[in-house]
Image: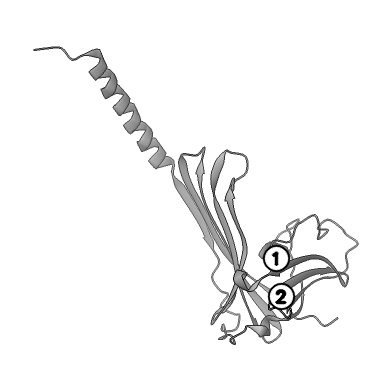
Amino acid sequence: MKPRSSGHLHVRTTMRHLAIAISILTLCSCSSSSIQQYPSDWPSQPVMSNDCSEVTGRYAEAKPTALGAAPPGVWAFMFPHSQVRLNDNTVKLREMSVYFDVEKSLHIDYLIDGSAVSSKIFTPSEYVCEKAGLRLSINKRTGEVFDKVPNRGTLTITAIMFRVKDYLYVKSTWDTKALIFYIISDAAFSEWWSRFSVHQP
């Protein structure tokens, strides 16, 4: 019997190593999710009007969910932390103002002690008025989406908001898909609710 050539053995060894590597990468691929259900003691979600104009108003910022955490409104609408003075103990009142301008762009202003310190503007192409609420495209980024490790992927942040009587309700969604070290698949999905009470200055 003719012995196998060294080249043939090299190919077989390479293929075996490749198969092992693929198996390891498959095992390493992971995903995580955190989904908060709509609280049962909150009111039923309404059917919105055609223009979702009922979301307009001035709302008090909600309390942070944990000590040292940013307030929910900052996370929901991605206001820059450097602009909203998170560690300033002299701040007495935090609010958000939601309104449409004449060109139907949606404005969400972050106010500290009555003065706007940060603003988000959403053109009509960046929001959709649905029956379940006003859907906003908060952020969509492609590139490096995780900290500390080389990666490439997409991060999509959306919000759906509606108003019932004296509260604005917001569902925030973060959806991240990436390749860690550019080869290992990873994904993270989180969804949570916040509400903000109407505040009359």
On residue 7, the disc is none
Task: List x then y, in percent, for residue 138.
Answer: 63, 64
- Kind of residue indicated by mark 1: Pro
For label 2, the crowd category at 10 Å Cα-Cα, with few meaning under 14, some 14 to 19 and many 20 or more, is many
Tag 1 or tag 2, which sits nearer the N-term? 1
The residue beneath circle 2 is 196
Q: Position of residue 69 (x, y in %)?
A: 73, 57
Residue lying at 54% horizontally and 80% vertically, measured from the top left: 132
How far apart are the two marked residues, 2 and 1, measured between alpha carbons? 9 Å
Quadrant (top left/top right/bottom left/bottom right) for the N terminus: top left
Q: In this rendering, is residue 12 above or below 74?
A: above
Q: Are marks 2 and 1 in contact (CB under 8 Å)?
A: yes
Image point (70%, 78%), residue name? 103
The answer to which of 87 and 180 lies nearer the viewer is: 180
Q: Amino acid at mark 2?
A: Phe
Q: Secondary structure at mark 1?
A: helix
Q: Nearer the viewer, residue 77 or 122?
A: 122
* Image label count: 2
- Seen from the viewer's position, the closer of residues 185 and 196 is 185
In the image, is 15 to the left or to the right of 25?
left
Disc 2 secondary structure class: strand
Q: Measured along the vertical axis of the image, is residue 85 above or below residue 57?
A: above
- Furthest residue toward left: 1
* Residue 22 location, quadrant: top left
Work out which quarter of the rendered image holds the C terminus and state it.
Answer: bottom right
Mark 1, other Cα within 10 Å: few <14 / some 14–19 / many ≥20: many
Give the left or right position of residue 163, taking residue 23 as reference.
Answer: right
Q: Which mark is residue 72?
A: 1
Measured from the top left, where is residue 97 in percent x and y? Answer: 77, 75
Q: Position of residue 34 (x, y in %)?
A: 53, 60
Horizontal side, residue 95 vs residue 17: left or right: right
Q: In the rendered image, which quarter is residue 51 located in? A: bottom right
